[in-house]
Amino acid sequence: TIHYVYRALISPLLLNPSMSPIHPFILVSAFSFQVINGSCIGGYLAGYGPTTTQDWAGTVPRIEIGLMIFFAGFVGNIFHDDELREIRRAAASNQKRKAEAQGEKSKSGGVDKVYMMPENGLFRMVLYPHYFCEWIEWIGFWIIGGWACLPARNFVINEVTTMVPRALTGKRWYVERFGKEKVGSRKAVIPGLI
C-alpha cells in the first residue's frame, strides 16, 4: 500500500511540477492491473499464507529481512525519482526566470522539455536506477510473502521482463541524445551487468 500511495497519489499529484497528459486507456489499464495484481497476491496470502501459530513459527526473521530489503528499494526509488523531478524543477525555475526577465508571463503548470543526465546516486552507474530500486522493493515483498508466493514472484518477473527492454531502448536514446562519451560506462539498469 505504501508504494502505491507514493506512486499513484503523492508523486503525480503533489511532487511533479508537470506531467505529460495520460490517455484514459492507460489510466484504466493501470488501475485494472493493480486491482487484479492486488487480488491475486491478497487471495494467495489469504488462502495459502500462514494461518496457525505453527505456520508463523520461524517466519519473523524472513519477514524482517524482506521488510528491510523492501524499504531499501522504496527509499532508493523515491531518491532517484526525486533526482529526475529535480531536473524538471530546475527547468521550470529557469524558464520562469527567463520569461519574467523578458517581461512575458510564464506558462502555468507547464515546463518545456529539458533533457539532462542525472548524476547523483546510482545514476553514476546506471541510467535507470529507479527501475532497479523498484525490483529490489518487490523482491523484498516476495521475501515477506515467502518464496512460494507465486503472485509476488510473478510480479517481480513481469516487472523485470518489461522494464529491461525499456531500459535498453532508453540507453540507446541516451547515447543518441548525449553521445557515448557522456553516457560513459553507465549500464542501462543493473550496475555492472546490463
Image: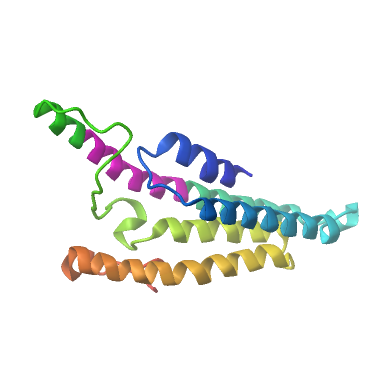
Residue drawn at 21 percent across, 64 percent down: 177
Q: Is residue 60 above or below residue 160?
A: above
Residue 61 at what x, y percent from top left? 70, 54
Residue drawn at 48 percent across, 46 percent down: 75
Point out the image quarter for the C terminus.
bottom left
User: Which residue is situated farthest in the front direction here?
Assistant: 24
Where does the magenta region start and end?
76-93
Point out the image quarter for the N terminus.
top right
Residue 48 at what x, y percent from top left? 83, 61
Residue 46 at what x, y percent from top left? 83, 55
User: Which of the colour schemes (rainbow, by chain, secondary structure, one colour) is used?
Assistant: rainbow
Q: Front-most of 194 and 107? A: 107
Residue drawn at 35 percent across, 43 percent down: 85
Q: Front-most of 136 and 42? A: 42
Magenta residues, dominant SS class:
helix
Answer whether residue 88 is visible to the viewer in this image: yes
Left or right side of 74 for 111: left
Residue 53 at what x, y percent from top left? 89, 52
Residue drawn at 74 percent across, 68 percent down: 148
Q: Is residue 92 magenta?
A: yes
